[in-house]
Image: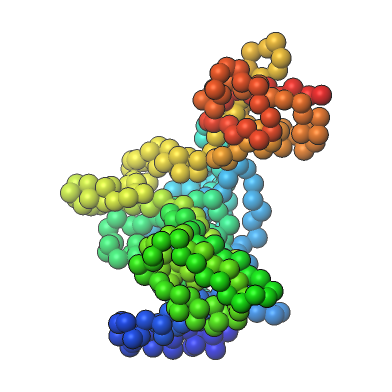
Amino acid sequence: MVNITEKIKEIEEEMKRTQKNKATEYHLGLLKGKLARLRAQLLEPAPGAGAGGGTGFDVSKSGDARIALVGFPSVGKSTFLSKITKTKSEVAAYAFTTLTAIPGVLEYAGAEIQVLDLPGIIEGAAEGKGRGRQVISAAKTSDLIVMILDATKRAEQRALLEGELEAVGIRLNREAPNIYLKIKKAGGMKITFQAPPKRLDEKMLYNILRDYKILNCEVLVRDENATVDDFIDVIMKDHRKYIKCLYVYNKIDSISLEHLDALAREPHTCVMSCELSLGLPDVVARCWHELQLMRIYTKRKGIEPDFSEALIVRKDSSIEDVCDQIHRTLKETFKYALVWGASARHVPQRVGLGHVVADEDVVSIVAK
Ligand SMILES: Nc1nc2c(ncn2[C@@H]2O[C@H](COP(=O)(O)OP(=O)(O)OP(=O)(O)O)[C@@H](O)[C@H]2O)c(=O)[nH]1
Ligand SMILES: [K+]
Ligand SMILES: [Mg+2]
């Protein structure tokens, strides 16, 4: 493991030394590819390795979605968990008060959202410092990362943390690159660009693919702005996770109004003071919004819909997903469904399993 860390350092240093220009472009691209491969290796648990591997904490998923609280020590992660759930996680003024993952349940809009309070991570977490790798593995399993930041600390903390998450393949608030890659058994490499690329060329992709020992494949670059990093992300797609992130600045009781105002205007950002219970409902509402969960109400024939209890489904869910939520075997006897609400073209609309529902639709399933 030490060896991989050293190799990573070596490559990072070589990249720093290498001037960026047309002549070094290919070499830098290759180094980036190597770096990505080594970082992925670092995250594989070593054979026979016990704790400290890339396995996260032993907390099973529950509820409708999972939120991970990630941040440096003593920013107020545990205080936040204790405020928004019934779980009490230990709070103290010293770093590393929390040593493992503490799950709580946030009840909101009829949904149960699991919130994981995690140990603080420090610089170098991605390389295995502290419990960093375990924390990051846990974050990787979440539907939303809530990055808690200390409003009284330097502005760089945010970029530092993002860097740690990036290094292990987490991509925050981004979509997978629009590049198609199909690995084949024979036929050589076929590289096509949908529009003239601005930051890539065929030779560069060819070199990187060869370095990854991918000799037979089909590539279609659909995005003219795609970069080498995007291309490496596509090759490494099994090690990449695209997760939403909400940045939450805590301790605004201790900063000026001007500073607070500037922080609150950053994208994907909320501000709060757990100590003064300021801004908490807003943070929770933003979490709900970012999770993009939908509430579906069911209705039996001849009876008013049941608005007291919603089924919680993910964004873009279909009637099939709704059936699966109700009962494992329901779709076997499914005949059609009637839908009232935003997704219905006329009410009620008669639809099949593939119909995509909208938030707060009312659905009545008709069985064979
Ligand atoms: N001023 C101020 N202090 C706060 C606020 N929220 C939490 N604190 C204090 O910050 C300190 C750290 O809080 P914790 O909740 O233990 O922080 P943590 O991020 O869970 O820390 P670790 O588990 O050690 O990583 C405690 O002394 C809290 O009382 C706040 O809104 N304002
Ligand atoms: K603490
Ligand atoms: Mg804590």
Q: Is residue 365 or residue 196 the one in the foreground?
A: 196
Whether 242 is drawn above or below 299: the answer is below
Question: Measured from the top left, where is residue 57 in percent x and y?
Answer: 61, 62
User: Residue drawn 46% across and 82% down?
Assistant: 30
Give the quarter of the image for residue 322: top right
Residue at image location 44% in from the left, 70% down from the top = 229
**Is residue 298 at all visible to an observer of this figure?**
no
Horizontal arrangement in the rendering, residue 339 relative to residue 197 (left or right): right
User: How many numbered marks have been drawn onto this rendered protein structure?
Assistant: 0
310 lies above or below 113: above
Depth order, front residue of 365/27: 27
- The quadrant of the image that shows the C terminus is top right
Residue 45 in the image: above or below residue 365: below
Q: Is residue 271 visible?
A: yes
For the point 61% across and 77% down, which residue is it?
188
Residue found 22% across the figure and 46% down from its top: 261
Which quadrant of the figure contains the N terminus?
Answer: bottom right
- Residue 362 lies left or right of residue 336; in this view the side is left
Foreground residue, 110 or 176? 176
| x, y percent for residue 330 | 78, 32
Residue 80, image x, y percentages: 44, 48
Q: Quick check: 31 above or below 220?
A: below
State the colouring used for the structure image.
rainbow
Q: Residue 210 appears in which quarter of the rendering?
A: bottom right
Please state the horizontal and vertical placement of residue 312, each as a whole percent of the image: 60, 35
